[in-house]
Amino acid sequence: MAVWVEDEAGPYQTVPYSGQSWQMEQHPVRQPHEYIRNGTAKMLTLFHPTTGQLRVKGVTQSTNAILHPWFKSQIGEILKALPEKLVLDEETNQQLWTAWQAGLSKRITLAEKLPPLRMLLIWDNLQGHYTPDMVLWLFHHGVMPLYTPLGGSWLNMAESIQRIIVRRALDGQNPETPEQIIAWLEAVAHGWNTDPTPFEWGGARSARRVRSRARRHALGGSGACIRRSVRSKNTLFQKWHLACQVTH
């Protein structure tokens, strides 16, 4: 199952951005204290955590008229590169779609007839993401939208990649126009895709699994583990054996 995450970052203003750099001692980089606010730029992001592939578009506005055509064009390209899904019977296919709504407090009404499920799209609760035209388009193309909870944007790994891209593009820079910001963001994203880094989920559940594995004892010869050490029993037996020898 292909899983992509989406988010919109910004706005980014035409102001000097602080950053770190190597400079001669006593000669730090100085940013101008006077600047003109000449508009803002935003960044539309689609990210594939499994491969690290990133799709970015810089814009000055993120209205539905701009967001939705970009979504459809990018998702269409992604779906074309995916292998075709096996055709399931109608009941099984409906159950597969419904399973992804288990436990949700707010569920989307699924269409009566659905194509094979090919992709999960994780994004936030932006009002434009609930537009019936957009949601039905996703359903028609086999894409299941999953919305992060209110105040739970950290669940979306697009937030993480955006921080990396923005920091690399704008730290220490003094853009004068939104077009400069857009060009820098897209250039950094292009550079990222030449050697992308996959992301792995490291949330609370992952931390619990790590702690659980730390409480186990690995056994040689296989991947088996035990929850209590067998070495302690051997040590007690050896102590008892030595005590008996001393007694006799």
Image: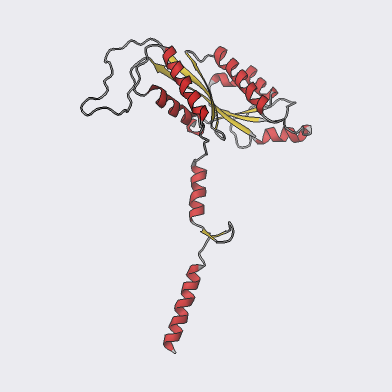
Q: Position of residue 61 (x, y in %)?
A: 49, 13
Q: Position of residue 83 (x, y in %)?
A: 70, 31
Seen at 31% across and 28% down, the residue is: 21
Is residue 151 something that shows in the picture?
no
The answer to which of 205 and 106 lies nearer the viewer is 205
Q: Quadrant of residue 110?
A: top right
Name the residue located 47 percent from the left edge and 21 percent from the top edge: 187
How many numbered marks are there? 0
Toward which corner of the image does residue 72 lie, by quadrant?
top right
State the residue at coordinates (39%, 22%): 170
| Left or right for 213, reference 72 | left
Image side of residue 14 versus residue 42, left or right = left
Image vertical order of residue 226 relative to residue 114, above or below:
below
Please identify the quadrant where the N terminus is shown.
Answer: top right
Image coordinates for residue 239, horizontal then vertical, percent: 44, 77
Q: Quick one: 134 or 232, which is closer to the camera?
A: 232
Looking at the image, the residue that sits furthest to the left is 26
The quarter of the image holding the C terminus is bottom left
Farthest residue, direction bottom: 248
Q: Nearer the viewer, residue 243 or 171?
A: 171
State how the image is colored: secondary structure
Residue 2 image point, x, y percent:
63, 32
Left or right? Give the position of 133 relative to 58.
right
**Relative to 21, does residue 183 appear above or below in the rendering?**
above
- The residue nearer to you, when weighing 110 against 188, is 188
